[in-house]
Structure formats: structure tokens, C-alpha cells
Image: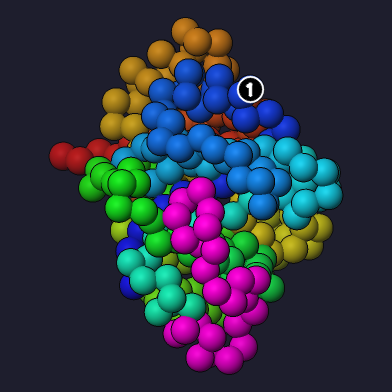
Amino acid sequence: MIDRLHHVAIVTGSADEALKFYRDTLGLEVTEDRVMEAQGVRGVLLAYGESEIEILEPVTPGTGVDRFFQSRGSTMHHFCFSTDDIRAELARIKALGDVELIDQEPREGLAGEIAFIHPRSMHGVLIELAQTRPDAHHSDEKGFDHVVARVSDLAAAAKDWERVLGLKLVNTIETPTSKIGQVQCGQVMIELIEPVAGSPGAEQLATDGERAMSMVAIDFPQINEKVTDLRGKGITLDDATPGVLPNSVRTSISAEQAFGMSVQLIAFSRS
């Protein structure tokens, strides 16, 4: 069973530099920091609530992560979902018959026993499954609010996210520029966004294809205090203003300041 979004992963050229932002400025706690020789990467996990951010730094030229970094630079790499039985999940997915698995069997990774699903089977999103170790970070607190993937056909994408991962569409929001399907996992929403023809998002879709957007929205209930704190640490960001989601205010830290991934701070009126 898949029960939560374990982490989102970014690739960048220096984990140490990225830590200056995610650990020292944003205030996230490092839960794991290790070089995985077999994959040619240094991986760092930082926790906030029930989820984590993974920083991947290529340390061996020519590996898959290094090629990804050389091609795209610092940006989102994958979404990882936690499962209590990765072998059962892989067997279930294999039985579907048409899902392309990168890993036929689990292997050791930073988050525990892991396996990847090819983005061709998940509308451009590279998906990792992880069965975490008993001593791994765990929290029931909300951390991330949502992550986003841009898709060409919301109905088809939602069907595959449910069929492959067991995650159901729970809500649809229409805006002047897009149709947003919300797929829930734990306390996090995966927003599948189908842009309206002629919108900037549609132009981006035509250029880049379906893929995970390089952003994460993090729930900071005391958002104004956090904005003040971050400005004091040299981060440039606007005051929080009403967001697209009901009863929300939001502001964003640019991807240029956050090593390739825009970090949206969001807060909801809970009255």
C-alpha cells in the first residue's frame, strides 16, 4: 500500500551549496546524508512534516543522474512514494502488463529499498517507490501541501495515477488558464494540471512535454513570520497574497534561489 509522498528529489551540482539554503536558511532537518557509489550520487534527505526533500549531487561522470544534470541542470528529478511492501507493489504493477518498470526488483537506495517506474508510464513523471527502514524519519505532521505535474490530458493522467499507484482523483478545479485535478496521498495533493489552449502553460507543455514541474508548496501556518525571517537571511520574496486554492495565501521563493526548484510557501485560513 502506498501511504504518503515520501520525498521530492532535485538534482544540483553541489549538495553543500544547496544545504546552505534548505538546511541553514529554510530550516529543514537533515535525516540522511550519504554517497551511494552504485548510483554515482551523493544524496541528502531533509524532513519537513511527513515528507522530505532529497538533494542529489552527481559524483560519478556518465551515470544516469549525471546525464540528467548535464542535460537539464538543477531541477526536479522525481517523486517518491512510501509503501509498506515494495515487493507486493511491484508484483501488482507488473500484473497490469503495460507499465514500464526501470527496476524489476527492489534495490538499496537512500530512502530504503527502492524501485523506479519509467516516466513514459506516468505521463512524464519519474516515480520512485520506497520501503523505508524502521529507523527512518517518520512524522504525522503536515509538511508539503502540494506538488505539480503538467499533463496533456487530465482524465487520462488521473486514470493512470489511480491504476498504477492506487491514488484517486479527489477534486477538480477550473481556472481561466488550466484544469487542475487533485490526487491525494497522505496529506499532500499531487496536482495534475492540464493547461487551456493558448495559455503560457500550454506553450510550455508543447515545448517540454508532460513532466513534473520543478516546484513544491510547503505549508507554513505562520507565513508572514516566515517571510520576515527569510528576508532577514537574504532571500527575496513578495508578501503573501491570496492564492488559487480556496482560503489560501501564498508567496514563492524563486527556483534561482532554491537550486532549481521553486519553493512556494502557503497558508490556509483554518477558522
Asked if residue 95 lies left or right of residue 85, the reply is right
The residue lying furthest to the front in this view is 37
Residue 49 placed where, x, y %?
Answer: 32, 41
Q: Is residue 99 above or below residue 23?
A: below
Quick check: can you spot residue 134?
yes
Q: Residue 260 vs residue 31: left or right? A: right
Location of the N terminus by quadrant is bottom left
| Residue that mark 1 sits on | 17
What residue is at 78 percent from the left and 62 percent from the top? 206
What is the crowding at mark 1: few (fewer than 14 residues within 10 Å), some, or many (at least 20)? few
Residue occupying the point 53% across, 42% down: 54
Count of numbered badges drawn on the protein: 1
The quadrant of the rendering that contains the C terminus is top left
**Which residue is rendered at x = 53% and y = 54% of the image?**
109
- Assign a secondary structure to mark 1: helix
Instruction: Name the foreground residue: 95 vs 125.
Output: 95
> Compared with residue 240, is residue 3 higher up or lower down, i.e. above or below?
below
As drawn, the residue found furthest toward the left would be 271
The quarter of the picture where residue 153 lies is bottom right
In-front residue for pair 158/1: 1
- 103 in magenta: yes
Magenta region = 91-114
Q: Quadrant of residue 35?
A: top right
Q: Nearer the viewer, residue 190 or 76?
A: 76
| For residue 22, above or below residue 235 | below
The percent coordinates of residue 207 (x first, y second) are 81, 58
Residue type marked 1: Glu
The colour scheme used to paint the residues is rainbow
Q: Position of residue 246 (x, y in %)?
A: 34, 49
Q: Is residue 135 left or right of residue 71?
A: left
Q: Is residue 92 magenta?
A: yes
The quarter of the displayed image where residue 221 is located: top left
